[in-house]
Amino acid sequence: MSELSCHGLRKSFGALVVTDDLALSVRSGEVHALIGPNGAGKTTALAQLSGELRPDSGSVRLDGTDITHLSLPQRVRVGVARSYQISSIFADFTVAENVELALQAVGGHSFRFFRPARSNAARLKRARELLAVVGLTDAGEASAQRLSHGQTRQLEIAMALASEPEVLLLDEPMAGMAPDEAHRLAELVRSLASDTAVLLVEHDMDIVFSAADRISVLCEGSLIASGSPDQIRSDPEVRRLYLREDAEAEN
Amino acid sequence: MLTAVVLASLAVAPAWVQAVDRAYLVTMLTRIVIFGLAAMSLDLVVGYGGMVSLGHAAFFGAGAYTAGALTYHSLDGSTLLGVPGTQQALVTWPAAAVLGALLGAMIGGLCLRTTGVYFIMATLAFNQMVYFLFNALEVYGGDDGVGLFAAGRSIGPLDASDDVTYFYVCFAVLAAFVVVLNLMVRSPFGRVLRGCRDNPARMAALGFHTYRYRLVAFIISASISSLAGAMAVTESQFLSPSFAEWTESGELLVMVILGGLGSLVGGIVGAAALFVLEEFAIDITDNWQFFVGVGLLAVVLAAPRGLTGLVLGRGRRNV
Ligand SMILES: Nc1ncnc2c1ncn2[C@@H]1O[C@H](COP(=O)(O)OP(=O)(O)O)[C@@H](O)[C@H]1O
Ligand SMILES: [Mg+2]
């Protein structure tokens, strides 16, 4: 049982306040969705939780321990992993090698100079298992740049899973996927949440309302609502925000 | 495969130049081997690590000054910081490699806190500092340098004063490092290094402390470059700051890019191309470097993976 939380998180870029007194938590066993219009500060919030960005003030805690001062690689080691909104994989490597690299990151140091990297059978086996989990069973030997957009998103998740995280921060993992692919991935995310805390940033409301246990709505850096899908659905402020968006989209 | 062909060609090259009555070319072949070794070590940093160093002549020069100074004091009968000099390559070369590693740790440790253009400039700045330091060493002739012609070339019990013998000593060292470096780029360490080159931000997100891996690669490369510098001064028997001149750093980069980044063997091919071109084009014009420019442009525009890339074909990449 683990819990990642933040309190009083603030971040501004120059005069632009992007995170404004943010408090959030996500526990193992749940999918907590973070939604909000474009530019609301979702990615920036995730970056502060993962350690990529230092908040101007506020704290991040894992199971009560303050981890605000830990760097990105250090947070991976204590169990917080993330995936990226824009796929960030190693295009020149094979698919399996991408996952093996992710496994190397947490399987002790890699100052091993003379044995071929590919000769570690246990690591290769584990990489294949992770690929199977995300539905890339047969793609292992392909070059990563040959993957379709949706497959790249799946690989991205397999890499995040390599560290066996307690907390998984997913930044729009379904972005740009075909609907059936997206729904399959949503099921996967759901199943991961049985023993992992999942914070899911997502645009597709169908997926958010079916996959999330809890939803928080971010607007201009601050939370305007947080609660169960039913509560969010009926929240007047959220409705106003999204109705406005829909109206803008129609214009 | 290509690596084997290149090494085999080098191995028979002395016999060949003698057969065509050009025995004087043996020293050029030795220089190809020595600079090929330095260029190959630079490729580890640039081609595999994505760190464009314009300061590797600092290490090459440091190696030359380590071996050169020890040799100088041995000829002179004086001491260096209380240590007697020696001409024994089995001492001077490892000493150069160790000093190169220490200097690499210092320079790399600072420069790797920057990236991109700033990294290039930082390595260049350190190169200049080292160069002017050697210029200021009046003991070794300041900017004129000092001849060490009375020294022999002792490698263990072997007397390598003869140019062909010395070529094969250097060739053996090169061949050993070809094997070592090829193992290294395929190892878990090499994979991490390539990851740091391709996507450092993602490497950090996976949990890697990228700085440490880059620094270790930089130190290994500096150490090998320094060893090559020691081999070069043993070859020329003349010690001068020109070993550490920043244009030398540029020349090493040209060799790597011409031969093919990220291929290791490309460094040797690039060194060979440059020295052979110099040897023959200089008869046509003193401005033979013009042809280097043309060749480099052709590579950058038409064959980004260099001469070795042309041979290996499009799709394939060494590792
Ligand atoms: N590094 C940065 N420098 C300046 N502004 C930034 C930076 N990163 C994000 N922003 C701005 O912060 C706001 C929030 O961005 P982001 O967190 O990416 O939003 P979201 O993920 O919710 O779409 C946007 O207005 C964006 O332009
Ligand atoms: Mg975003």
Image (tube, rainbow, N blue to C red):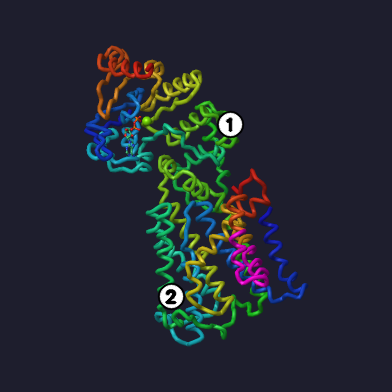
For label 1, the SS is: loop
- Gap in Å between the C-alphas at discs 2 and 1? 56 Å
Q: Which mark is residue B134?
A: 2
Q: Which mark is residue A139?
A: 1
Q: Which mark is residue A3?
A: none
Q: Give the residue drawn at x 42%, y 25%.
A: A192
Q: Which residues are magenta?
A: B272-294
Q: x%, y% of residue B54?
A: 47, 61
Q: Is residue A191 above or below residue B144?
A: above
Is residue A157 found inside the magenta-colored segment of the image?
Answer: no
Q: Give the residue drawn at x 43%, y 75%.
A: B134
Categorize mark 2 by other alpha carbons within 10 Å: few (<14), some (14-19), many (20+): many
Q: x%, y% of residue A191?
A: 43, 22
Q: Label 1 lies in what chain? A: A
Categorize mark 1 by other alpha carbons within 10 Å: few (<14), some (14-19), many (20+): some
- Please tell me in which quarter of the rendered image ligand 2 is found: top left
Determine whether, in the image, residue A229 is placed left or right of residue B211: left
Determine whether, in the image, residue B198 is placed left or right of residue B274: left
Is residue B279 found inside the magenta-colored segment of the image?
Answer: yes
Q: x%, y% of residue A136?
A: 55, 28
Q: Let me know if residue B168 appears in the view.
A: no
Q: Amino acid at mark 1?
A: Ala
The one nearer the camera, A214 or B277, is B277
Quadrant location, the N terminus of chain A: top left
Q: Give the residue drawn at x 47%, y 67%.
A: B246
Quarter location, residue B41? bottom right
Q: Let me know if residue A57 appears in the view.
A: yes
Q: Amino acid at mark 2?
A: Phe
Quarter location, residue A16? top left
Quadrant location, the C terminus of chain A: top left
